[in-house]
Image: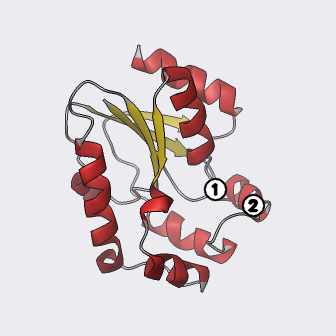
Amino acid sequence: MIVIIWGVAGSGKTTVARELARRLGCEAYDADEFHPKANIQKMAAGQPLSDGDRQPWLADLRRLVDQYDTGETAVLACSALKASYRKTLGFDQAYVRSVLLNGDYALIADRFRHRHDHFMPADLLRSQFDSLETGHRGLTLNVSPTTTELVDEIMRWLH
């Protein structure tokens, strides 16, 4: 099983994924680490990625996702904003669990402004919200609670 924690930048995906993986005793992955250098440079320059830019990245992530159809567990933090991306990632597979971290723009923008360790500038956040398609078969959580509360809820849902 692989649990994919997804949503817009600044929603807490990586923080929640790391804590969930710690509690599950499994590997945690951050999809940002799989981006080709050209994608990172483009985003750092304030340009949103096109679907074409994302395809090689999504294909690499799908190979990772498919490694967890064996009964092992992992957690992946990934934006997965569009339904087509989630299809490519294998969200329809029985071994994939989908958790959307969702919240209002003002709250996430405020969090985003306080991040200083990420390559994506804050002005790209609006494009993420514009691209976000929230429909999925899984758990949707509002990002307002603490990381501990969010992970508690995910743990209850998984078990």
Q: Earlier in the sequence, mark 2 or mark 1?
A: 1
Which part of the image, by quadrant, shows the C terminus? top left
Q: Write the residue at 57% across / 46% down.
A: 14
Q: Which residue is mark 1?
A: 10
* Left-right relation of 55 to 117: left
**Residue placed furthest toward the right:** 114
Q: Is residue 109 above or below residue 141?
A: below
CA separation, marks 2 and 1?
8 Å
Q: Position of residue 32 (x, y in %)?
A: 49, 61
Name the residue nearer the viewer: 61 or 81. Answer: 61
Residue lying at 37% horizontally and 79% vertically, measured from the top left: 50
| Vertical order, 130 against 99 (above or below) | below
Q: Secondary structure at mark 2?
A: loop
Say whether marks 2 and 1 touch (CB < 8 Å): yes
Amino acid beneath label 1: Gly
Identify the residue at horizontal 19%, vertical 38% (top origin): 93
Q: Amino acid at mark 2?
A: Arg
Q: Which mark is residue 115?
A: 2
Q: Nearer the viewer, mark 2 or mark 1?
A: 2
